[in-house]
Image: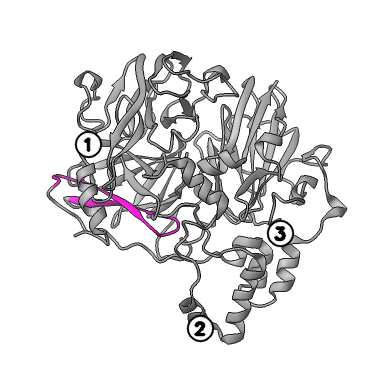
């Protein structure tokens, strides 16, 4: 049974499913026996690796395009390392432009981090750069280009780091499930369209039919008030993703929904699924219909097992889950947050068995809670919008800080709740400021609330072993995620990267970072080189992360031990947001 696939998707998805099988046999190294059973990409093990970056012709949707590939495959080869080993990776650039590889979530010397302009100069055409570092952790990670839009055109792959002495996670089968997105268009042209019209790819915008539906349900007055509110704010309640399925094809291990990636399992087996979101623009909501998932790792770190039926993750995040199969075949279903597309794969005994694929859920509108936090929750969705909007965007000259580092608190046991908007937030680069942010980490987010399924939230996560540093933070650093949708401008504190100065951490200090999202989109924030230890609003440790999603109007905090000298990147992992300015350099010195 196939879901609502267009004829175009069906025909060309099936064709695309086998285009990567022409890898040189020499790249297919030791495959770890039955532990990992991928057909593609190649699985490389050992201490020394050779990766070649070049262009490869692909066809995911009926249109042939050139992709940026590593060793000729999408995804790139899965690299298998062992904790405690020193690995050497020689990366040769056969492109006509500079390239790079960043080892996402890996703790290493900053010179090996692979961010051009921050940690090194990049890899020039025709040159080979040698990365070498000691592997200090275990778990599931990934790697990708940090140059231009190369990541968006195919340059990403999985990393599995085997623990030195076992991680206590027992499974009879082990599969990487790397989700990604692909566009046939030139990413620079896509970016230019968004700069010209930020809702260019949004086909879920409110319609006349929606208005009459609201009038029937809410009454004419409330329906008019609701529409007027959004118009006055010049915002769109369906603005959940910059790019929809109109521009993207979604992939699971390099295969489309019609291509139907297949992972071998036997009925009754305990299976470990290593989910990696390697997309450039897409939040996925993931489930295996009919099965419970036990989350055992988040961002490569072991967590206390928590059972759920669905989880959402953004670009950069990883979750390892355990499922126990009870049929001959099960669908892995990943729908996009804006509900415009999905990708699926199958776990089964044979590819001939096709389990049912669910329909996508209906898209939902952002609520006032998503826009204003606790003020929106108390005010409700309808009526009183003039007052609510005023509260959201009111002038805060009385407490403009112009700097966002706070010291001298009587106690830093819990994160500060006082909202401080920097002076730089009051300008053309910012169209929204939130004064009453929410700190509810138990909220699964728009589209997942009260859907009848048990959905994982950040509040469910507990890294085994607790925080890596028991010291109280010496100070707080508060930054706001900001933007102007009409201008498609993204920034920290209203300052785009090109005009910003680095954030400084003192070497060895324990510091609390507060991030408040003053935009209406969810941002997956990735800090390179240092762990982000997520806490709740009481200062209780939750989980060690390298990428943390922050919902609209949400205020979160995490603690950092600045134990890695050097220059690091810190940015939103939505690729266009990063390139548009939501990027800062962090200096540990």
Left or right of 408 on screen, residue 140: left
Picture quarter containing residue 543? top right
Left or right of 67 on screen, residue 110: right
Judge whether residue 169 is colored magenta. no
Residue at image mark 1 = 19
Q: Main secondary structure of the magenta part?
A: strand
- Sequence-wise, the earlier of marks 1 and 3 is 1
What is the image's colouring?
one colour
Whether the residues at callouts 1 and 2 have beta carbons within 8 Å, the answer is no
Residue at image mark 2 = 217
Between disc 1 and disc 3, the foreground one is 1
| Image spot of residue 330 (x, y percent) | 23, 51
Judge whether residue 346 is colored magenta. yes
Between disc 1 and disc 2, the foreground one is 1
Q: Quadrant of the N terminus?
A: bottom left
Q: Which mark is residue 436?
A: 3
């Amino acid at each position: 049974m196939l879901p609502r696939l267009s004829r175009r998707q069906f025909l060309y998805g099936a064709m695309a499913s086998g285009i990567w099988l022409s890898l040189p046999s020499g790249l297919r190294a030791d495959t770890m026996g039955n532990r990992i059973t991928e057909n593609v990409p190649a699985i490389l093990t050992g201490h020394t690796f050779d990766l070649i970056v070049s262009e490869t012709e692909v066809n995911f949707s009926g249109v042939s395009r050139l992709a940026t590939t590593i060793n000729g495959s999408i995804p790139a080869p899965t690299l298998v390392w062992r904790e405690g080993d020193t690995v050497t990776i020689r990366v040769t650039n056969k492109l006509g432009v500079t390239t790079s590889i960043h080892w996402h979530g890996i703790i290493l010397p900053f010179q090996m981090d692979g961010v051009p302009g921050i940690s090194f100069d990049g890899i020039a055409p025709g040159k080979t750069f040698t990365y070498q570092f000691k592997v200090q952790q275990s778990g599931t990670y990934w790697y990708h280009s940090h140059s231009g839009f190369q990541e968006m055109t195919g340059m990403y792959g999985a990393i599995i780091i085997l623990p030195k002495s076992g991680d206590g996670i027992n499974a009879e089968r082990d599969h990487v499930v790397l989700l990604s997105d692909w566009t046939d268009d030139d990413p620079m042209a896509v970016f230019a369209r968004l700069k010209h019209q930020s809702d260019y790819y949004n086909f879920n915008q409110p319609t006349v039919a929606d208005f009459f539906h609201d009038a029937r349900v809410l009454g004419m007055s409330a329906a008019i008030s609701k529409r007027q509110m959004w118009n006055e704010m010049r915002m769109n309640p369906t603005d959940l993703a910059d790019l929809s399925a109109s521009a993207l094809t979604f992939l699971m291990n390099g295969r489309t929904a019609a291509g139907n990636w297949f992972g071998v399992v036997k009925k009754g087996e305990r299976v470990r699924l290593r989910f990696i979101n390697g997309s450039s623009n897409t939040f996925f909501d993931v489930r295996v219909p009919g099965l419970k998932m036990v989350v055992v790792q988040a961002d490569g770190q072991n967590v206390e097992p928590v059972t759920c039926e669905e989880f959402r993750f953004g670009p950069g995040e990883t979750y390892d889950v355990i499922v126990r199969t009870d049929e001959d075949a099960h669908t892995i279903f990943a729908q996009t947050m804006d509900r415009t597309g999905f990708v699926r794969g199958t776990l089964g005994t044979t590819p001939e068995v096709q389990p049912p694929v669910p329909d996508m859920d209906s898209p939902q509108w952002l609520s006032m809670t998503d826009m204003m936090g606790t003020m929106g929750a108390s005010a409700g969705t309808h009526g009183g919008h003039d007052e609510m909007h005023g509260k959201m965007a009111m002038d805060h000259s009385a407490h403009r800080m112009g700097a966002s580092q706070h010291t001298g608190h009587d106690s830093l046991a819990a994160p500060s709740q006082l909202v401080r908007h920097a002076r730089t937030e009051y300008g053309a680069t910012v169209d929204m400021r939130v004064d009453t942010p929410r700190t509810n980490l138990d909220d699964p987010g728009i589209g997942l609330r009260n859907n009848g399924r048990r959905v994982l939230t950040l509040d469910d996560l507990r890294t085994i072993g607790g925080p890596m540093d028991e010291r109280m933070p010496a100070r707080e650093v508060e930054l706001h995620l900001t933007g102007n949708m009409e201008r498609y401008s993204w920034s920290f504190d209203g300052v785009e990267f090109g005009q910003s100065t680095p954030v400084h951490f003192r070497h060895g200090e324990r510091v609390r970072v507060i991030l408040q999202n003053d935009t209406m989109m969810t941002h997956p924030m990735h800090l390179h080189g240092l762990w982000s230890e997520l806490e709740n609003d009481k200062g209780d440790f939750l989980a060690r992360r390298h990428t943390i999603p922050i919902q609209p109007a949400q205020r979160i905090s995490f603690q950092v031990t600045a134990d890695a000298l050097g220059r690091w990147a810190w940015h939103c992992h939505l690729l266009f947001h990063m390139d548009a300015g939501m990027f800062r350099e962090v200096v540990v010195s």
